[in-house]
Image: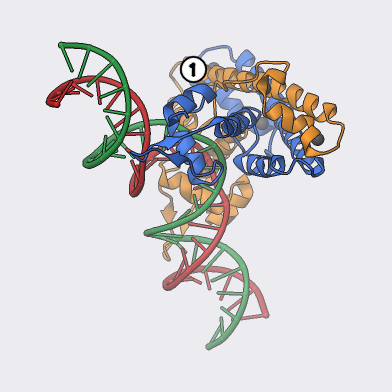
Chain colours: A blue, B orange, C red, D green
Amino acid sequence: MLTIGKLGEAAGVKVPTIRYYEQIGLLPEAERSAGNQRLYGRKAMERLAFIRHARDLGFTLEAIRDLLSLSDRPDQSCAAADAIARAQLAEIESRLARLTALKAELERMVVQCAGGKIADCRVIEVLGDHSLCATDHRYPESEVPS
Amino acid sequence: MLTIGKLGEAAGVKVPTIRYYEQIGLLPEAERSAGNQRLYGRKAMERLAFIRHARDLGFTLEAIRDLLSLSDRPDQSCAAADAIARAQLAEIESRLARLTALKAELERMVVQCAGGKIADCRVIEVLGDHSLCATDHRYPESEVPS
DNA sequence: CCTAATGTCTCTAGCAACTATAGCTTCAAG
DNA sequence: CTTGAAGCTATAGTTGCTAGAGACATTAGG
Ligand SMILES: [Zn+2]
Ligand SMILES: [Zn+2]
Ligand SMILES: [Zn+2]
Ligand SMILES: [Zn+2]
């Protein structure tokens, strides 16, 4: 049995994050020692590693919640799990498209600036006027982290 | 003079967002009509368009705050503004690198799944075990939106 | 066995950048 | 003059944590 600190170390998750996951019901309530400290076994360890890995792949906690409850029913069809993964892929692809456009615009701005006064700065000028942009980079379809 | 609704419409910014920008000091306090409603002129319109455009390019409000105060001093060197833009470009590039790796992993997962039971689902399997991944996609260097 | 250092406990508040709600007042059209 | 849209303030919620306060538990050294 691991204490919360050892578990966090093993899984690469900070201690308050583990408590947070328990609080929102993503991890089950942990066993407690005589002195009321949380104790974890291998199952909890695996579940936390799953969460960590899915987070690293950009899944939201909501998606992870669904994936976890699916993985608790091994005899069911995996169609739902695959759909979640495909949705995540689509999300990443749309962010990639947007970021690629942003990168192009930022490069243009930076390259075009001759480096004089603010009054002549291409960066400031372009920021004030989207019509100077080469691409239509607006309207982020999604506004989620990572 | 525009009301807040007209301004928002013109700049593509929602009304509560404009009030929020004023509250955090990104926009100056607006003039008020006899009935205490906000009124905006062309300068406010330009400032809001600048903010909107910079947000669309992924700059944080903090960076925008700095850019705005720089643009208020047209005779100074634009080095600081350029540095902010270059930092933003670097940020976008690092997110792009990470998202590219994520996309590759997600594609692998989705493609490898044969679509049977959860117990045999490659998606669930890979999520539980990073060593099945082809790339090292972990440790997001930055955790900022978009 | 005692003490000091570290770890853990709960609870609360804070971060970015908004968005939503409630309960009011003001304005513009008919 | 009335009605409905738009505006006002203030507060709370969103996501995924992170940081702090103050109290209790555990462990290592002397
Ligand atoms: Zn410049
Ligand atoms: Zn633009
Ligand atoms: Zn599958
Ligand atoms: Zn992996």
Give the quarter of the image for residue A133: top right
Q: Is residue A96 visible?
A: no
Q: Specify the quadrant of the image occupied by residue B32.
A: bottom left
Q: Is residue A77 left or right of residue B142?
A: right
Which amino acid is tagged 1?
Cys
Which residue is at 71% across, 24% downward? A100
Seen at 83% across and 30% down, the residue is B113
Question: Is B25 displayed left or right of B55 in the figure?
Answer: left
Question: With respect to residue A114, does C29 lie above or below?
Answer: below
Q: Which residue is found at the position 53% from the left and 48% from the top?
A: B17
**Residue at mark 1: C-beta within 8 A of ligand 1:** yes
Which residue occupies the foreground of this view, A52 or B61?
A52
Ligand 2 quadrant assignment: top right
* Quarter-of-image position of residue A128: top right
The one nearer the camera, B75 or B134, is: B134
Residue B13 percent coordinates (x, y): 59, 47
Q: Position of residue B86 (x, y in %)?
A: 56, 17
Element assignment for label 1: loop
Return the residue nearer the eye: B95 or C6.
C6
Residue B131: x and y, percent? Answer: 68, 18
Judge whether residue A46 can be spotted in this image. yes
Q: Chain of mark 1?
A: B
Q: Say which residue label 1 marks.
A: B78
